[in-house]
Amino acid sequence: MKKILIILLLLTIFAIVSSASEITLNGVQRPQSAILFIVDGFGSSYYYPELTPFSLDGSELTKAHAPNLTFGTRIIDIKTSHPVTEIAHSVIVTGYSDANEEIVGYPDATIYDVAREHGFVNLAVMETGDFSNMRREQDIILFAENNSFNDPGISIQAKASPPGIFELMYDWKMKMPSYLNNVSGVRKYSAYNKWGIDAANAVANYMIKNHPNQKFLLTVNVGEIDGGGHNLGDDDYVRLIEDLDRDFYPLYKTASENNIALFLTADHGMSFATKNARRGGHSSDKYSSKIESLHIPLVILSPNAAPGVVSGEYRQEDIAPTLLSILDLPNHLQYADGKAIKIKDYASIFINADSKYTVSLWNGDRKLSESSDSELVFAGLPLNTSYTLKASGAEGIYEKHVSLDSDKQFNFKSSEAGINSNSRSIIAVILILIVVIAGIIIIKRIK
Ligand SMILES: [Zn+2]
């Protein structure tokens, strides 16, 4: 009973502390949830219409025909600085160019921390990139402990899974052998990838059907484009990409029909020494500076992003801030040095303020909106417009002028903000007392 009381107490405090006000000024079409689909070792050089892959000796290599992987908004030139699986995955989820597996575990370091803080549940199906801190960021993850075809050790790690997801993931763990039976060579690599895609698609559809109001961030990783690049040859590598193009489509359909943002990317690419080389690589000295190892795809489907190709040079660390911007979440990533790519068709202003301030948004002499809260969001603002933000309290008025070319963040925090002056704290104390009294009554009744 004590445990229940403590949980109730924490939930009450959490509900009070985490509440935020959002003011949507214009009708925005925002995705409810997101899928981050990471293909291990998938170089965009091998399928982007604008790029051509070459081997180390300068021979032009074959490209894949993969029209299903060029949907929506596509960033042409985006590179990783670290073509190494674990590091690159860490960069993707932290937005920090020097990230590593350890930093992923730090508080407020990842997209998962920000998403969770704003009511999302973090789900994952990962064949590679699932190191221990990555797994700990997830509420539930179905993952491959090894990538052995003969003995794929599939596990589930969970802390706060939405009802039914554990059982669903367990079913998918048991389905793995049926995917790999009676296939070999390229088809076996593709079957392994397809298992990950189908499992992720099942998770997304289960959430849509059974938890329609629960926002989720689903991270997916398929491992065997990389596996094929290392163990087969450049011709088979391209075949694997074409299989991925075919098998990926159902997940794309799920996202596009259910208002889910879809981010397709890779940790790093792949390089080959010669045409018809039987082995490729990306992280060793021989391959790690080759553009084919560094160019990664970034293809985004979202109702608030205009479709088309985006030119300009971008880095892998820009992915996390872009994902948060598309979901209209503040970029509270503690270590991020990447910047959101400007693909959203409106901007939002995120404000942290003391609740005793009244924050108002002005366009010239016209007051557009006004509110008081510890976290405020003015969403759906037209781009390339100028605004003035005013925060007024007992100590005076603070003003900030903003020219909106992208999302912005502001802090209006008074240093003397004492706990007694905060009306939230008083409400919190009253609610906590109610919870405690209710708990005592329940305990007495049970006795
Ligand atoms: Zn990798």
Image: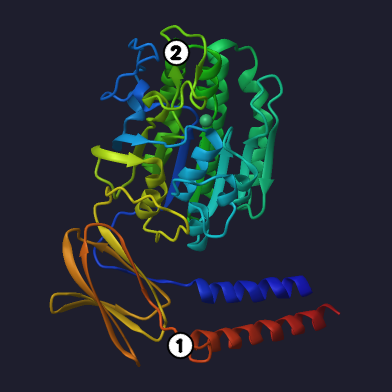
The amino acid marked with disc number 2 is Ala
| Residue at (48% x, 20% y) in the render | 286
Looking at the image, is mark 2 or mark 1 earlier in the sequence?
A: 2
Q: Secondary structure at mark 1?
A: loop
* Label 2 beta carbon within 8 A of ligand 1: no
| Residue at (51% x, 27% y) in the render | 283
Q: Secondary structure at mark 2?
A: loop
Q: Position of residue 143 (x, y in %)?
A: 63, 37
CA–CA distance in space, label 2 to label 1: 63 Å
Confirm whether residue 211 shows in the render.
no
387 vs 445, left or right, is left
Quarter of the view holding residue 134:
top right
The amino acid marked with disc number 1 is Glu
| Residue at (44% x, 49% y) in the render | 95
Mark 1 is surrounded, within 10 Å at the Cα level, by few (under 14), some (14 to 19) or many (20 or more) other residues, namely few
Please, is residue 67 above or below residue 313 in the view? above
Please, is residue 177 above or below residue 29 in the view? above
Tag 2 near tag 1, CB within 8 Å: no
Q: Residue furthest front?
A: 285
* Label 1 beta carbon within 8 A of ligand 1: no
318 vs 202, left or right, is left
Quarter of the view holding residue 80:
top left
Figure quadrant of the N terminus: bottom right
Figure quadrant of the C terminus: bottom right
Residue receiving disc 2: 273
Please, is residue 203 above or below residue 344 in the view? above
Q: Which mark is residue 416?
A: 1
Q: Which mark is residue 156?
A: none
Confirm whether residue 83 shows in the render.
yes
| Residue at (16% x, 63% y) in the render | 385
Q: Residue furthest top?
A: 276
Q: How many numbered marks does the figure carry?
A: 2
